[in-house]
Image (cartoon, grey):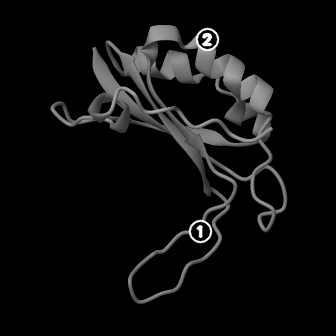
Amino acid sequence: MERYLVVFRGATVDEAEGPQHDTVRWDAWFNGLGSALVDRGGLARSSVEVPSRLRGPKLNSASLSGYAIIAAPDFNEAVRLAEECPIFDEKGSVEIARLIEGQSTPAQADPGRIQPVAPG
């Protein structure tokens, strides 16, 4: 199994307010991933893009909304797992990247770590 970083993108309301995630639907999706879920990551309330060191931060229409790490045998299966993600119903998208092997996730580094849950 390979590990994939799934990045959730896109604001769902006025960018100043940040995304409004339906935590019940997100919890159901995360739980539905079962053993494919390596690290639940977290959902973001707001984000800015820093395009370079010389420019200040700016809002971005494809702003970061959160991330998770999943395990799948290949990209096709990673995409299949991500297709049911609630971000699509929140007018967002996902970006999927295959991670380099040999790198540990925070959950692997500290198995006793409590996974963050977005406030409801």
- Identity of the residue drawn at 43% across and 33% down: 113
Residue 66 vs residue 88, the one in the foreground: 66
Residue 84 seen in the current view: no
C-alpha separation, residue under disc 1 versus residue under disc 2: 30 Å
Q: Circle 2 sits in a helix, a strand or a loop, which is it?
A: helix
Q: Is residue 44 left or right of residue 98?
A: right
The residue singled out by tag 2 in the image is 32
- Identity of the residue drawn at 81% across and 62% down: 17
Q: Quadrant where the C terminus lies?
A: top right
Up-down relation of residue 90 to residue 15 (above or below): above
Q: Position of residue 51 (x, y in %)?
A: 46, 75
Q: Is residue 61 left or right of residue 41?
A: right
Q: Mark 1 or mark 2: which comes first in sequence?
A: 2
Check disc 1: other Cα within 10 Å, few if <14, some if 14-19, many if 20+. some
The residue singled out by tag 1 in the image is 48
Up-down relation of residue 73 to residue 62 (above or below): above
Residue 54 seen in the current view: yes
Q: Quadrant of residue 102?
A: top left
Q: Is residue 86 left or right of residue 80?
A: right
Q: Amino acid at mark 2?
A: Gly
Q: Is residue 96 left or right of residue 22?
A: left
